[in-house]
Image: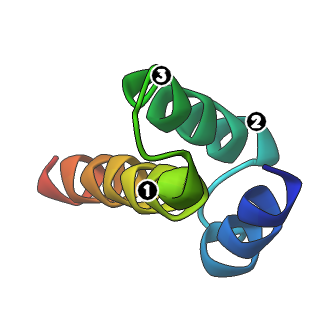
Amino acid sequence: MRKIVKRLEAAYGGRRSRDQILLAVLDGRQELHGSHIPDFLPILVERRARAILDAQDEARTAR
């Protein structure tokens, strides 16, 4: 999971704190808990975390 957080920090670091990024990763991981596809879990968690962070950015922009 550290690698995912580091990649997301590189992508969102200027707009998001490390805590916000970590929370998105943990949320994505929780949503996929019990998944029967463990080999793909890291990429799926990263994609879900990116979706969460992007949605938060869109919500901020809409205000």
Relative horizontal placement of residue 44, taking residue 9 as reference (left or right) = left
Residue reaching furthest to the bottom: 10
Say which quarter of the image contains residue 44: bottom left
The amino acid type, in three-letter code, at marker 2 is: Asp
Asked whether 19 or 63 is in front, the reply is 19
Mark-to-mark CA distance, 2 and 3: 21 Å
In the structure shown, which secondary structural element does the residue marked by tag 3 occupy?
loop
Residue 18 x, y percent position in the rendering: 79, 47
Relative horizontal placement of residue 63, taking residue 43 as reference (left or right) = left
- Residue at x 76% of width, y 36% of height: 19
Residue 63 x, y percent position in the rendering: 16, 46
Q: Is residue 47 above or below residue 49?
A: below
Q: Given this view, does label 2 or label 3 mark the residue nearer the observer? A: 3
Q: Given this view, does label 2 or label 1 mark the residue nearer the observer? A: 1
- Residue at x 73% of width, y 48% of height: 17
What residue would you read off at disc 1?
44
Q: Which mark is residue 33?
A: 3
Query: Does label 2 or label 1 sit earlier along the sequence?
Result: 2
Asked whether 18 or 27 is in front, the reply is 27
Crowding at mark 1 (Cα within 10 Å: few <14, some 14-19, many 20+): some
In the structure shown, which secondary structural element does the residue marked by tag 1 occupy?
helix
Query: Does label 1 or label 3 sit earlier along the sequence?
Result: 3
Crowding at mark 3 (Cα within 10 Å: few <14, some 14-19, many 20+): few
